[in-house]
Amino acid sequence: MWRRRLALSALLAALVWSAVLVVPSSPTFAGRGKSFLGQEAPEIQASEWINLPARTSVADYRGEVLLLEFFATWCGPCRPSITHLIGILEKYGNRGFHVLSLSNEPRVQVERYIHLMERRMTYPIAIKAPNPYAVTGIPHAYLIGVDGKVVWEGSPMSLTDDLVEKQILRIRKWRDVEGRRAARAGKLLDKGELAKAWAAAAKVLDSDRASEADKRSAREISGHVQAEAERRLAWSEALVGDGRPDRAQAVLEAIAVSFKGTKWNEKADLRVAELERDVSVKEVVTALKHVTRILGTLKTPVGEKKREAVHRALKEEATKHEGDAKAAIEHWVEIFREKWVPKR
């Protein structure tokens, strides 16, 4: 009899635990936050970022589609939500859909989480960013449309492809601008050919035959290209300040390609040359290349033995460097110092 009771107890316990585990992945499991539906999306004020983006304010995404997600590493329901968002971003990230996450946790804790968990969060994360959204339950998210207004809010798991697609279709097509001549420059801009779009718009502005509508549209296209170039240059400087001159150089090299033949191409080349002449920067870049090589052996989810092996390799590499280069590696040593555990 006691064996039957023990088996029944074990079965009931298993059913209870399975029910608990199912709850986080349920689309109905929603967080709570102040509603801004139909209103202008409030701004965030973040001074520290993981995966530092080129655009760090809500206003920077005007004209495209932005999802603000509130999460924490200790939040069980956030894990399936993160996987869900990564999937949507993989589908629509090249069509004007963006994700910004916000967490109130220490940077190392969040970085440990994103490097040791199953799906890596490659989108930007704002750390301890003051904001008026008053989110008291997570996961919770706000979808912001092209006009800067909140068009949806709720559990990230409830965000559908159809909803994202509907908002993406509202993104402006530059080929539809006024003026036949300017529309040629607009088509190039739609294709992401920034330098060619800039040159084509300049040709319209210099033409005596262009209509006022053409010139008006050409000025708008030129302003858009200029803003994008200057934003990317500012991003590279922010990356240097964040201790990632390796990423800054990559951004500058991309600017030189995207804006070839323009003044921004020249600025990017000059800045790369300056960074390469700075001995301390070169040492940090070299150190971070070693970190990238070590981390390149990781496959998620990261097992405990692998984490320990990476930690040892990083510690050993840190002993080969000094100053800022050593500090850059020690940051990664701290991330892999212990296994990830949820902490509130």
Image: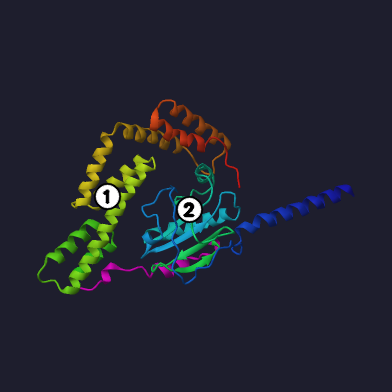
Q: Please, what is the three-letter code of the amino acid marked with disc 2? A: Ala
In the image, 233 versus 304, the foreground residue is 233
Foreground tag (1 vs 2): 2
Residue 169 is covered by the magenta coloring? yes
Where residue 89 sits in the image (x, y, percent)? 44, 58
Taking the image as shown, residue 40 lies to the left or right of residue 71, namely: left
Residue in the image at 27% along x and 45% along y: 253
**Residue furthest out toward the top:** 320
Numbered label attached to residue 129? 2
Numbered label attached to residue 255? 1
The image quarter containing residue 214 is: bottom left
Residue in the image at 32% along x and 46% along y: 236
- Asked whether residue 162 appears in the rendered view, the answer is no
In the image, 332 versus 6, the foreground residue is 332
The image quarter containing residue 341 is: top right
Where residue 22 sits in the image (x, y, percent)? 65, 57
Where residue 340 sits in the image (x, y, percent)? 57, 42
Which residues are drawn in magenta?
A: 156-179
